[in-house]
Amino acid sequence: MKICYLDAFSGISGDMTVGALIDAGADATALVSALESLGTGARFQIEKTKRRGIAASKFTVEGGETKKHRHLRQILSMIAGSQLSARAKQNAERVFQRLGEAEASVHGVPMEKVHFHEVGAVDSIADIAGACEAMDLLGIEAVLSAPINVGSGTVNTEHGVLPVPAPATAALLAGKPIYSRGPAMELTTPTGAALATTLAAEFGSLPPMKIHAIGYGAGSRDFPENANVLRVLIGERQSAAEATTVAVIEANIDDSTPEVLGYAMERLMEQGALDVSLSPLQMKKNRPGSLLRVVARLEDRDALASLVLAETSTLGVRLSTAERRVQPRSIVEVAIPGGAVRVKVAADGTFAPEYEDCRKIAQSTGTPLKQVLAEASHAYLKNSR
């Protein structure tokens, strides 16, 4: 599968995305031709430049209509009547639909009454349409993204001075991993956030891949402390162990009962924790205690940290991130006396019957759990021959 990894270490905007994809090999002539069919009257310039010594491509939209406020239906009509590829049209429509949902949520109005401000301008329309067309020109089958650097400070908008990330950007990035580093300014725009969150199927560490092309898209300013570029990595996804970024939540506890800790572990797993463990500790004043460690998806971190504080006696937790590598795996269902059992099968042939399925059968039939596990393993081996 040909994938595109968005490395937004200095944020992401629409023009940076288009520039990076052109830099990675998207046909600039074909792209400009498709954008001209939008009928905006704009001119499109692509030039090589540098940001902190990194060679990058700068995509600029010049002239065209000056109208900034458009309703969603007007923008979708422009896209539908253009010569963008069918897939690019579909993706551009999805991006604007997501933008419309975010704007409607921020302003508390129905979708059909949303009129786009900055993102309704010609340059933003061209950026979104251009990014989607460039993806199609490169034959990208899936998009993945790193956690996104949003910047900090404030930004001037049509609604006045607002904190970074601006309301629409924050709404678009809800549930996605973000952070703040670098200059005190907006690094991720609503257009960039909409592109990343609509097109990217996953957010996390760089996946196992064979890189075929690398592109850098330049932002408008050149910062003294970091290169203001978006990097894209284009290549084939590999079948190596999957690498993902996870949150780790820890607490040292010396004043909770085993019953409370056991219940907390159950609640954490029910609420989506990937793993929960307790390890014995020798704490201050020679008190025996326990280390509670929770491994969670980044988007579940805050909710599970709050659950630890609510369900245990600890007054604080430690939060960190770690890289988790997981072998590709599939689920195979086998039938045994008493019901069906799912079996997890790894790429190297290792397999394990699903414990919960086996436990339910053991309870309902009165069969010892170890016998149910053995029957499920035998059924899988028999079926896989």
Image (spheres, rainbow, N blue to C red):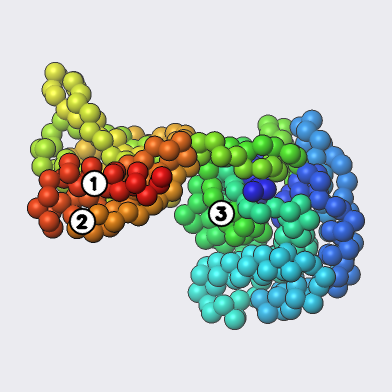
Q: Residue at x 72, y 74 (%)?
A: 75
Q: Residues within 10 Å of mark 3 (few under 14, many from 20)?
A: few
24 or 197: nearer the viewer: 24
User: For the residue marked with disc 1, what is the amino acid?
Assistant: Glu
Which residue was labeled with disc 2? 337
Q: CA distance from mark 2 to mark 1?
A: 8 Å
Which residue was labeled with disc 3? 201
Q: Quadrant of residue 166?
A: bottom right
Provide the secondary structure element on which disc 3 rests: strand
The first of marks 2 and 1 along the sequence is: 2
Quarter of the image with the C terminus is top left
Which residue was labeled with disc 1? 375
Of badges 1 and 3, nearer the viewer stands 1
Of badges 3 and 2, nearer the viewer stands 2
Q: Residues within 10 Å of mark 1 (few under 14, many from 20)?
A: some
Query: Percent from the top left, x then y, of residue 279?
Result: 22, 28
Q: Residues within 10 Å of mark 2 (few under 14, many from 20)?
A: few
Q: Does any portion of residue 379 appear in the rendered image?
A: yes
